[in-house]
Image: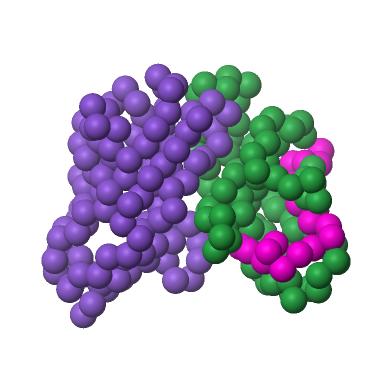
Chain colours: A purple, B green
């Protein structure tokens, strides 16, 4: 069975602080994909990143970076120099066969100006 | 704009009623997925169709059904509605493939917010 755990329910930071959102996953499949999605207050789901299980390279995109570690089954997401526009609910998700996404419970990030 | 459209945006109905949610995938996408986001259950996968055929089922209630039509649009039918069915229902689409082990990006629609009173 697949499972995604986002232990942090809510996080508040002051603008310009760095923040890391944790994601731990469980799967018995050797081939899988991990994702992060952002859900702003408007409600839509915005894709941020996809990683496959064979690629453990960390990735940086602007102020966003992702740390994938198979040894600890974690796929953490860091926002550097947070901004008010980063306030949203962030979901980590896992996909194995059939492409279906298993989502974590989400972390609500509030960036205080 | 993901290219996936969902109608209606909002739906308010009463318990015991039946509603139909509609999804039009991105042009060229063969796979359609339905997800439910509720306060109790979080964001969960309901069902997937590929080129008109059901491919995978998640936590979909028996009161719910879906289909994908020859023009590839999909409908999610919810019947005998209960208060707990109030949720945001997302549709997503992907190119799709016969290979279950390969992954195709899923693009999400804006969602239909269902309120059952």
Q: Is residue B98 above or below residue B67?
A: above
Q: Residue at x 42, y 66 (%)?
A: A40
How many numbered marks have been drawn onto this rendered protein structure? 0
Q: Residue at x 30, y 32 (%)?
A: A73
The part of the image, by quadrant, that contains residue B79 is: bottom right
Judge whether residue B36 can be spotted in this image: yes
Q: Residue at x 59, y 44 (%)?
A: B45
Judge whether residue B32 can be spotted in this image: no
Q: Is residue A104 above or below residue A94?
A: below
Quadrant of the rendering where the C terminus of chain B is positioned: bottom right
Q: Is residue B76 magenta?
A: yes
Q: Measured from the top left, where is residue B64 in percent x and y?
A: 78, 50
Left or right: B34, with A61 as reference point: right
Q: Is residue B66 magenta?
A: no
Q: Measured from the top left, where is residue B109 in percent x and y?
A: 58, 56
Q: Residue at x 70, y 62 (%)?
A: B85
Q: Measured from the top left, where is residue B107 in percent x and y?
A: 53, 47
- Residues A100 and A47: in front is A100
Left or right: B22, with A10 as reference point: right
Left or right: B5, with B71 as reference point: left
Q: Measured from the top left, where is residue A23 in percent x and y?
A: 32, 45
Q: Which residue range is magenta in the image?
A: B68-88
The part of the image, by quadrant, that contains residue B81 is: bottom right
- Residues B79 and B105: in front is B79
């Amino acid at each position: 069975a697949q499972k995604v755990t986002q232990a942090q329910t809510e996080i508040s930071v002051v603008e310009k602080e760095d923040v890391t959102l944790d994601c731990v996953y469980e799967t018995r499949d050797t081939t899988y994909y991990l994702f992060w999605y952002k859900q702003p207050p408007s409600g839509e789901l915005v894709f941020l990143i996809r990683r496959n299980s064979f690629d453990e390279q960390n990735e940086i995109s602007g102020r966003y970076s992702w740390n994938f570690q198979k040894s600890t089954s974690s796929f953490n997401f860091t926002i550097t120099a947070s901004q008010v526009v980063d306030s949203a609910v962030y979901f980590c998700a896992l996909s194995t066969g059939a492409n279906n996404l298993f989502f974590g419970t989400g972390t609500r990030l509030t960036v205080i100006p | 704009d993901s290219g996936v459209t969902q109608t209606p945006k909002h739906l308010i109905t009463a318990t015991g009623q039946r509603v139909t949610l509609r999804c039009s995938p991105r042009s060229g996408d063969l796979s359609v997925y339905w997800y439910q986001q509720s306060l109790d259950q979080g964001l969960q996968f309901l069902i997937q169709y590929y080129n008109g055929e059901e491919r995978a089922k998640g936590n979909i209630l028996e009161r719910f059904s879906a289909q994908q039509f020859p023009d590839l649009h999909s409908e999610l039918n919810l019947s005998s509605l209960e208060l707990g069915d109030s949720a945001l229902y997302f549709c997503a689409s992907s190119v799709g493939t016969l290979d279950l082990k390969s992954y195709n990006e899923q693009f999400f629609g804006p969602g239909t917010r269902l309120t059952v009173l």
